[in-house]
Amino acid sequence: MIRGLWDRETVALLLLAAFMPLALAWLWFGGTEAIGRLALALVVSGLWHLIFMVARAQAPSFAGALTALAVAMLAPVGLGPFAVILGISFGSVMAELVFGGWGRNVVNPATVTLAFLGFSWPAAPWPDLVLPVAWAAIPAAALGVVFGLLSLRIMAGAAVVAILALAAGIDLSEVLPVAGIVLVLLVCDPVASATTSLGRWLNGLLFGALIVLFTATWTNAAPTQIAVSAALLASLAAPALDEVALFIWLTRRRRRHG
């Protein structure tokens, strides 16, 4: 059987290639601690993928590396190995592997892992990512758009809200850098984000609106915590946003041809 070029593993590998500027910048500034976090996340995520793929007689997926990278970069710091192993196990298994693997999941497994760790260890500090790492998200986003894997509409929707908030005098200086990283790694996930054109615009607008809302009302919340929480809610709402887009399209079609 001849497989097409655009199978699941091709998409995963191209996403990894697109994220390389972001990953390398983070590793450069994070040093040995970042390398250790990424190594642990890769081992745990890879083992769970291997277990499920062997049980289903399927080849292991490179998608586990995407989860590992996002978790290593954005998870609360100071957690012991047990907490990280438990969080990745919960997120990878319950949000992805039980649904049949990456491509069939509803929510990004890294988003679920990060939310699980944040809720389970609320006293653990969230990471402060240096500004050069945030700048590295720009070439990563550009490569993702060029490869046809990341939605420019989602990014544009979030950018519109950010511009309007800044014009209104809302201070987003602390949260914007990490929000850009979360937007690329989590919100624009081609599997868990909206799929219709209007739905993608709404997806980006919702993420941006949640960032602004949490920044204005959630006192003492870390910027990474705000961005991850907004990503989780925006991801959960993605199917409903597609339903809204389809409803609007059908209503216009009926009026036009009725």
Image (cartoon, rainbow, N blue to C red):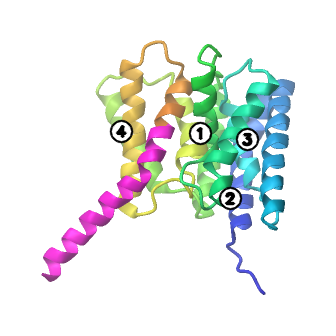
For mark 1, what is the residue? 112
Check whether the beta carbons of the residues at disc 3 and disc 4 lie within 8 A of each other. Answer: no
Residue 87 lies left or right of residue 49; in this view the side is left
Left or right of residue 34: residue 91: left
Q: Is residue 256 magenta?
A: yes
Residue 98 location (% of width, % of height): 66, 54
Dot 2 falls on a residue whose secondary structure is loop
Q: Are marks 2 and 3 in contact (CB under 8 Å)?
A: no
Q: Secondary structure at mark 1?
A: helix
Which residue is identified by label 3? 69
Q: Is residue 42 above or below residue 35?
A: below
**Amino acid type of the residue tagged 1 in the rendering:** Val
Q: Are marks 2 and 4 in contact (CB under 8 Å)?
A: no
Local secondary structure at mark 4: helix
Q: Which residues are magenta?
A: 231-258
Q: CA distance from mark 2 to mark 4?
A: 33 Å
Mark 2, other Cα within 10 Å: few <14 / some 14–19 / many ≥20:
many
Quick check: can you spot residue 163? yes
Q: Position of residue 138 (x, y in %)?
A: 60, 44
Q: Is residue 32 above or below residue 189?
A: above
Q: Earlier in the sequence, mark 1 or mark 4?
A: 1
| Residue where numbered disc 2 is placed | 101
- Pointer 1 with pointer 4, Cβ within 8 A: no
Amino acid on which the number 2 mark rests in the picture: Gly
**Residue at x 64%, y 37% (from the top left corner):** 113
Which residue corresponds to mark 4? 161
Q: State the CA–CA distance, disc 2 to disc 1.
A: 15 Å
Residue 246, located in which quarter of the rendered image?
Answer: bottom left
Q: Is residue 162 visible?
A: no
